[in-house]
Amino acid sequence: MINLLDEVGESGFQSAAFLTYGVDLGFFETKVMNRLLETGCRNAIVVADGHQAKDALNSGAQLRYVGVRCPLVTVRLGNRAFHPKAALMVGEEKLKLLVGSGNLTMPGYTRNWEMFTKLEGREAARTALELLDVFGDAAAWTPLEPAFRAWRSRLENSAPWLFGEEDGDRTVELLSSSVAPILPQVKALLGGLVVDNILVASPFFDADASALSWLVDNFFPEHLTLLVEDGTHLDPARVGRVLATMEGESSVRRFIGASRSLHGKLVLFKGPWGEALLAGSPNISSAALLSRAGRGSGNFELATFRSGVAGEFSALLVEKVGEPVNLEHISPRSPLLVGPAVSPLELEAAWISEGSIFAYPAETTVQNQADVHIALGRGGSEIIGLRLRKGENGSFFRALTDEDRLQLEKIPVRARLLGSDGEIGAPVWVQNLDIVEKRSNPVQRPRYAKGLRALESDSLGPEWESWNSLFEAFTALSNSWLRYTDARRPRTNKPAEPKPDSQPAWDPERFFISRDEVTLELPRYFAKVEDSGVAIGDFEYLISALPSARMATDDDATYGVESTDALADEEPSEDEEADEDGTDEKDAESYPEVTEEHLQWLRSRLHRKLRSIVESYEDSISEGAVNNKAEASYLCLPYPALQKAIITAARVSLLDVWQLRELASRLTAAWTTKLWKNLPDKEELEARLGCAATSLATVATITSPWLRQLADADEFDYDLHKQLQESLRELRPTFLSLKGTYDAGEDSQAWEKLVGDYNRLRHVELKEEFFASWTPLQVLEDLALRYRVWQLDEAPLWQRVADELGVGEAVQRDGDVLRVRARLPHVGDQERFLSRLLYSIHEGTQSPAAVLWNNEDAASKIRRKSMVLCPDLNAVIEMSFFAVKRPLLRLHRAAGGSTTSGVYLNNPKYLTIRWKGSMIHPVDNAQATLLSCVATMLPELPIATNNSA
Amino acid sequence: MYTYDAYVRLGIGVMDARTDWTEAPGASERIRGLDHLSLESTAENIYDQVTPGFTNLAKRARYYALYCWILYDFFSGGYEREEFKPFFRRREHAYALACLSHNHKDGMVGEYGIMGSIKASRNWHQREDPVDISRSHIKSSLGGYGLYYRNAMQRAGLIYLEEGKERLTQFTDGRPSGRALAEAFQRSIEDTTYFRLYRDEYDVPRAVLEEYGRAACVCVMADSEDGEVLRQALLQLDAPEPEASVRAMHLSRAKTLTLVFDAIRNCGVERLDDSSWRRLIFYGTYADDREHKVPGQLDDNSRVWKMYQQREYHVYALTSMWVAMLEWLEDRRVAPLEEWVEEFDQTVDLAQAGRQFGLELRRGTPSEITIQEMLDSVAQAAGVASFGPALSENIEKGLGRNAPCSESSIHKALAGEVEMDISEFAGSALWLSMVLFARTRGWTDADAPSATLARTGGSQHWSVESYFREIDTRREQSVLDFVAWLYQGLVRQHLAVALSKMPLDTFMVLYEDGALHYRAMDSPQFTADRYETILIACRDLGWVEEKGERYELTGLGEKALTGAVEALE
């Protein structure tokens, strides 16, 4: 028997595609997609019936992958069903096809009696290509066709071998109603062979039994057998009439299902020549078997047809054919076909592509409108409302802002059409093809030989040079981790280089990295690193291309000569050709003057940007447990890339030493936090290990050939991660015992020793019984002793508190006001966070102070929250502003406080307010005084200070 | 047409092709299972905070002493580790027989909770002499210790794990410890023939076991030396324990015991059983409507119990709604969820369902009324004009436990006191949820600890806080919209829970072709009563005794209560 979950969970595949009628998205994600990711299969797609996929449970499911890692392409065929069931799985060396009757649901995969044909091996390539054509036929019916085309393109890139395999055996024929009606195809394949017996099993027969009748009229069997069970949908009278034409040479038998329902569909043909089996999605109905797929004609069905020797297929039914049964005694049930009914405000599809969002209304009347209004939301709350203008072929579109785009790429979101009178349509999952493209690149085997050679050959000393060469090696190594050919690299329009003899004045617009590019391009590059793996070359190129970099360093900051350059596949400009002709590059390039002011500005921007990227990385690795190998691998990959970016930026003087230490420390702290996540006392460990020293050891460990050898892992995947985690876990007792001696470590000699240890750590021979004697434990012990080398400057209290609360980068001080732009903590922590920030400004309650927190959690109902200390009144006023309801005011009595607890708050009570014209009006004089204090501190709040009571 | 044979004959490469039926992995692993919505375990997590050292199944106090002694006897005997299982089973079986042979003291709990009592009883009643204790008395190799007591003993500070192996705690400062308990137990039995001659024998004379029972039966712990050690171990209000978390665990348990003692002392003629306890901690009143004045020192502990019971009602309401749908689906066998929501609208008369609890609604059709109207109805029953979040304290005051619409009254009706059809049952369950929201909405943000407790379970397990938040945001929606959302969530929750348990098959419904397929029935229930366990331990230890219909504090109990209250001050 075929275990479908095991089949689709087999490792070694990088791409998977599913055809199904009904789909249970919760089941798919939990039992199938999770497993696919675990095995490194990242390029997945599901093509399902559009009316089935829109049911309430799917629409309201809590999803993680659909639309952001795996597109769901829904196909609507009007009043006909999109009914095929198949899976196609392709790897570098492997191929598997499953074509059958089970839907992508729990019962379809694990409970019903389903029949599947499984094909494996490169010899199945021809059939696989035919199946790809079936997918293509299906996609042609939906506005989401680009999703399939992109999937196929990724497949072509990751498994080019498949597309050269046009030959193959034809022992299994794939029959799709998208090509021609199925039964006539069968008739042609049987080619006039005599059919003595036909056995039919199906859970569904059409009302007039016309398909059954067609079988009898076209194959003239001597005997016809029907396998049915209670619940089979059929009309006993109509079916009986067809059987009567057999003049007694027919029988109806009970299917022996032993409490499992029959959902498999098959027609078995027998003759003196042997047997042939039609099995797959089509039920015994004319819509399934006698019509070509299309709106108003037939279902979209898919089946396999095989021939064999006598007994080859009937063996499958030996234990399934039960006692004769009278059709009248079968308890038929009506099929639960979800009709083609479409509500007026229904979306057939919504998707994001190339930075724009598209929506395709199901109703033609809506399609003819000039524009439509949609709401995007997750978890039941709206996050973005957009008006879309008319596009092509009935769709509507709008370009997304960067902010919207970032909001929409993290988790699946739903789109709803809004009516002119405030009505809301049913939700549909948005397919974010842009983010799927980033995240679905099939994981490739590493090709890191060059990088490793470089790593092994360099000798790292305490000088910058040696470190730079290390990261050179990283470039090679990391590029090798992905199949990241030049042809697939992102292109960026590069303006013409300035002429050698020109000396233009500073003009940001003329630079390749202009102000806009710093703000727009950097996030794009960084997002790429975060989402699809390492792109160190991009970082290096980008940073070294900064005008400040060119001007600030004239030693070996190179531009345009790296083979891993993002522009490597672009047509060379005239100047570049000149370079190749031997022109001295430095002479050829002549940059405009960059003032110190510009440089400062760039430094500041870059520092902030890198901080936010590190923060994002911290978030990404601290959210949730690592569930599978793919996720572990995914989390690990950006680490060296970010380190490289930070080091390179410092190398070209775009970061000063303190900024470098801060960023490197934070990044490493995030990394180590993840590694120690499940251990007790992790807060203590985080504090101690938040140093770049550990970073070096970590980098050394993950790149050491000996570790790869030890872990028997030739790719950077979960095995390696696990090995690393386990070895580092052993360090914990050592670190704990060193607690008291941390303060003693300092001086440059320590640094030199650290570097020496680092080199030894990387190059130690496995034979040295590494874990037993000279171990990473000892090395890291030394590194820990040198922790102080990496300690940061003492920051002001408000900054330290903000850092401790995890919002360091999101806080800005403006006199007595701290403004925070970040995700609000949970409601239970909000008061504590705000009162601590409040205290941090003046370390007491003697001066007025305020905290205004703009919530960046779009799913939250609280838009912003403020806390204002009015010392004259001994009061703190806490205000919450909501997305939809009136603000909430709470008055606390304020007294003293401490660094750890914040301003002491007690006797809280809610205040009744007047909310009129979107402004808060005081209800009495006392409240007017309070609100006046708040308005003085935070004039941007909607407060009317006149007493209108 | 080409056949496989033809290809083989022609020497052409042939793909690996197979047509077959599909397997049903786990289909044979059908089990009844528990907590099909994964909502109940959260309540257990809450009361675990205040009952460390007790579990629902570690019911008899003297087993703590017995198991400590077995470990002690083993460690001091120089045995090899692999000898432990037979060593342990001999002693546990003999102890079960000893207890079964004993005529228990009047008023004591009796044979309840004897480990392996079914098979041991059969062995005892075969009347053979000597009794062969090599026969199996319990399936699990480490008996009740491995199944139930090990975790409880660890949290009571009697044993600890060192590299995965159990060790008895022992202290030099005279504190109660596992070792002290073991030694005290040994002193209680060291004069018995069993201890001296038979504890490593497989054939033990009946008279020896009877003598052992007289010395060490579960019912005679109160007066024993090990009873005193265990009393001290369980009631440590200020344990000189360096680890803050362990110290907090001792204090929390001691406070719960003090809370129980205080409630029993003041309960008047009321029999303070589990259901009375639940009502007492939730409503803060005794049966005769006297207020239960919680000593200030126990406020934090009492709050946890209160929030625990809030969660219990919350889960009961949701599970009842779920069961109503299953009842309907059982008849239909296969139906889309949307049909049930339609059916709910057509058959559930919320006005009629509310009337039986004194709740008035002008209309009863779910699609025609809003959640706010239901909440207003609850508010009006409490004498408050309409519902608003800030008014839930007033509503709480206006609706005592004796009110016809109190959670307690509706729960009783749902639990079978009132005969109802599916629609009445579903309507009543929804009312329970609304009453709970209207009355206790304010608890969830009364203070930080309450907010934390209300958040327990998070949105994944429908924490009270996340559910209340959802009601809050949907107040202006029709009840039917809310019900549709609720049922989608419940079904999704069940499918997710059952999927996570695969290959074990615990599905109550399956979901295919957009429809639900009925598999099995569920039932609403409260989680197992931890209070009952504590009460039994208190009786075993001589703190509480049963007198007629009531439970009373003994002299020991009075002394413990007084001492605890003073110490806490």
Image (cartoon, helix red, strand yellow):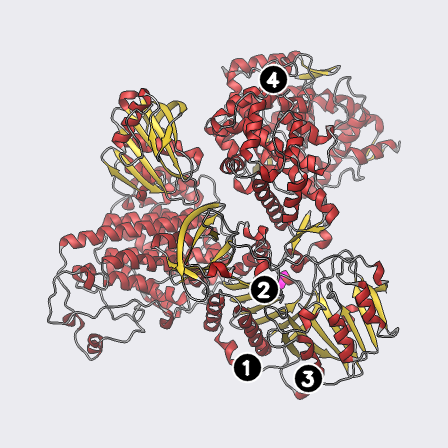
Disc 4 secondary structure class: loop
Q: Are marks 2 and 4 in one subunit?
A: no
B218 with respect to A632 (left or right): right
Which residue position holds label 3? B2
Q: Chain of mark 1?
A: A
Q: Chain of mark 2?
A: A
Disc 3 secondary structure class: loop
Q: Are marks 1 and 4 in contact (CB under 8 Å)?
A: no
Residue B77 visible in the snapshot: no
Please, what is the three-letter code of the amino acid marked with disc 2? Gly
x then y, percent, for residue A160: 48, 75
Q: Nearer the viewer, residue B32 or B50?
A: B32
Which residue position holds label 1? A166
First in sequence, mark 2 or 1: give its number. Answer: 2
Please, what is the three-letter code of the amino acid marked with disc 4? Thr
Nearer the observer, disc 2 or disc 1?
Answer: 2
Screen quadrant of the C terminus of chain A: top left
Q: Which mark is residue A78?
A: 2
Q: Are marks 1 and 4 in one subunit?
A: no
Residue B372 visible in the snapshot: yes
| Other residues around mark 1 within 10 Å, as few (<14) / some (14–19) / many (≥20) | some
Q: Are marks 3 and 2 in contact (CB under 8 Å)?
A: no
